[in-house]
Image (cartoon, rainbow, N blue to C red):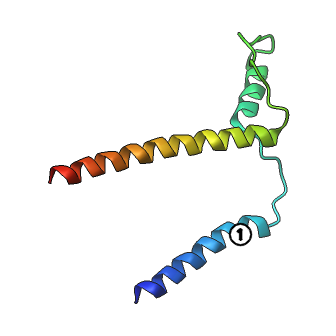
Amino acid sequence: MSILKSNKILLALVAALMIAPLALPIAGEFGGSDDQAEGVIQEVAPGYEPWFSSIWEPPSGEIESLLFALQAALGAGVLCYYIGLRHGMSKRKD
């Protein structure tokens, strides 16, 4: 199998993985673990009061998701930079 053919197959698989969640009819709530934990705490200890509250609440769930994605991208960028730096340093020694 040629490299070009295997790349086309992989590209088709990636496209299918990206399109499948959009095409499948999924009904339900996508709640986070924080919401689930709050429900369990209320069941176990109904009188529980949190120690502190958030300094700033994002105006919408979309902005909260955006900030989370930016945080993940920044972390991945720093990690990849470090890995590339170490790889370059090891190549220089050889």
Vertical placement of 59 versus 70: above or below? above
Q: Nearer the viewer, residue 46 or 23?
A: 23
Total numbered circles: 1
Residue sitting at x 69%, y 38% = 67
In the image, is 87 to the left or to the right of 77? left
Residue annotated with mark 1: 20
Q: Nearer the viewer, residue 79 or 41?
A: 79
Residue sitting at x 64%, y 73% = 15
In the image, is 54 to the left or to the right of 94? right
Farthest residue, direction front:
92
Expressed as whole percent of the image width and height from the top left, the position of residue 39 reads 78, 28
Q: Amino acid at mark 1?
A: Ala
Q: Secondary structure at mark 1?
A: helix
Expressed as whole percent of the image width and height from the top left, the position of residue 74 reads 55, 41
Vertical placement of 26 versus 28: above or below? below
Expressed as whole percent of the image width and height from the top left, the position of residue 14 reads 59, 71
Tell me the quarter of the picture where residue 61 sits.
top right
Farthest residue, direction left:
94
Q: Residues within 10 Å of mark 1 (few under 14, many from 20)?
A: few
Vertical placement of 92 versus 6: above or below? above
Residue sitting at x 69%, y 35% = 33
Expressed as whole percent of the image width and height from the top left, the position of residue 44 reads 74, 19
Q: Nearer the viewer, residue 72 or 42?
A: 72
